């Protein structure tokens, strides 16, 4: 029996060097910005205790999913667990999905995945293959950290799960400069120690970047969501859509955008669901967004979301949350 390959190891993190990251060869250290309160959620330990979690170490792995009313419903703390939910919905639907993504961030960064000469994905930390048809392999890559909260969309595109990305922002939030473009995913620079493998590259452009997979990308406000979208639909919701107050990232100085009340959040959800054909919604995926959305807002926002799903789709988040959403 051939031994398992060694993980390709180390990933090219030089592009992350800045105020909070210092590099010395393959070693790096992280320090807090002087205004560290923008990174800290003081209510998080209390909130996690209410979810039955005794340590922040449990946050990355917490997720639940079920099938109700013919739809896959997924709730997780880290948003990256939406990817295996999409894979299960894709497998059930038998065709690529159109994802309507309510979020303050694109989540279209490059994951820590490598591509071989046939375009097959590989986890750079474990060396394990990552396959669309095997949601467990996607879960393993999320669990290892190779697919994170800012980079779970690209593997979905590379795996053929997605036909179109529609990124919906709150009405008072400025839209990106490129509102209608192409999400391009392909093979980028070769790995320095494994020239047979290349890093996955991702770009939002006008269709000129080298890529093996391209899908249309639209950035819009929720009231302007297009009424006609092709294929099975995913309603994907990050709670930082309602509150991005913590802004747990180095560029936190950027304006966090409007803080939505539960009523405003529910109103936007109703608008989104009014624009979509409810009979074609194959999946609803939800991430609470630790480090971005303050934890004291998770429960009221999830209750509001569950109530809107009951109104519009006849399903709730009951059984997926540590409490009965009523």
Image (spheres, rainbow, N blue to C red):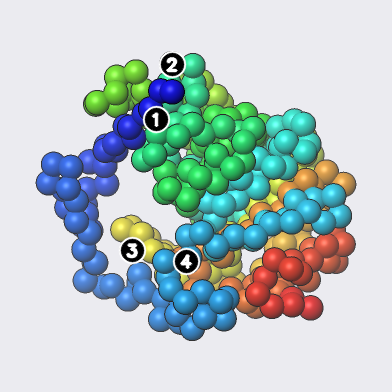
Which label lies toward us, 1 or 4?
Answer: 1
* Mark 2 or mark 1: whose residue is earlier in sequence: 1
Q: Nearer the viewer, residue 49 or 47?
A: 49
Of helix, strand and loop, which one carries label 3? Answer: loop
Residue 9 picture location, percent across and down: 29, 36
- Tell whether label 1 touches label 3 (CB within 8 Å): no
In the rendered structure, find residue 58 and report the number of the disc placed on it: 4
Few, some or many C-alpha atoms within 10 Å of disc 1 (few <14, some 14-19, many ≥20)?
few
Which label lies toward us, 2 or 1?
Answer: 1
- Tell whether label 3 touches label 2 (CB within 8 Å): no
In the rendered structure, find residue 253 and report the number of the disc placed on it: 3
In terms of image quadrants, where is residue 229?
A: top right
Residue 64 picture location, percent across and down: 65, 60
* Mark 2 or mark 3: whose residue is earlier in sequence: 2
In the rendered structure, find residue 117 and report the number of the disc placed on it: 2
Tell me how far mark 1 sits from mark 4, CA to CA.
28 Å
* Mark 4 or mark 3: whose residue is earlier in sequence: 4
Few, some or many C-alpha atoms within 10 Å of disc 3 (few <14, some 14-19, many ≥20)?
few
Which label lies toward us, 2 or 4?
Answer: 4
């Amino acid at each position: 029996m051939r031994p398992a390959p060694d993980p390709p190891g180390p990933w090219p993190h030089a592009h992350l060097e800045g105020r909070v990251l210092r590099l010395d060869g393959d070693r790096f250290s992280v320090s807090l910005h002087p205004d560290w309160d923008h990174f800290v959620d003081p209510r998080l330990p209390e909130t996690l205790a209410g979810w039955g979690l005794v340590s922040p170490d449990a946050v990355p792995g917490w997720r639940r999913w079920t099938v109700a009313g013919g739809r896959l419903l997924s709730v997780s703390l880290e948003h990256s667990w939406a990817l295996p939910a999409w894979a299960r919905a894709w497998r059930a639907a038998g065709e690529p999905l159109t994802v309507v993504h309510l979020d303050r961030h694109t989540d279209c960064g490059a994951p820590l995945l490598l591509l071989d000469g046939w375009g097959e994905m590989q986890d750079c930390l474990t060396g394990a293959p990552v396959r669309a048809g095997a949601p467990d392999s996607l879960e393993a890559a999320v669990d290892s950290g190779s697919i994170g909260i800012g980079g779970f969309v690209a593997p979905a595109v590379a795996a053929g799960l997605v036909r179109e990305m529609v990124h919906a922002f709150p009405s008072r939030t400025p839209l990106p400069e490129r509102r209608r473009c192409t999400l391009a995913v392909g093979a980028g620079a070769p790995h320095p120690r494994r020239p047979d493998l290349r890093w996955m590259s991702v770009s939002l452009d006008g269709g000129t970047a080298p890529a093996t997979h391209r899908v249309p990308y639209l950035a819009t406000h929720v009231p302007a969501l297009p009424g006609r979208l092709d294929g099975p639909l995913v309603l994907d919701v990050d709670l930082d859509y309602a509150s991005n107050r913590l802004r747990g990232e180095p560029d936190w100085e950027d304006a966090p955008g409007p803080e939505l009340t539960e009523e405003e959040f529910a109103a936007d959800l109703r608008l989104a669901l009014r624009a979509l054909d409810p009979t074609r919604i194959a999946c609803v995926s939800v991430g609470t967004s630790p480090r971005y959305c303050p934890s004291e807002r998770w429960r009221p926002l999830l209750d509001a979301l569950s109530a809107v799903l009951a109104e519009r789709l006849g399903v709730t988040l009951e059984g997926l949350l540590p409490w009965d959403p009523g």
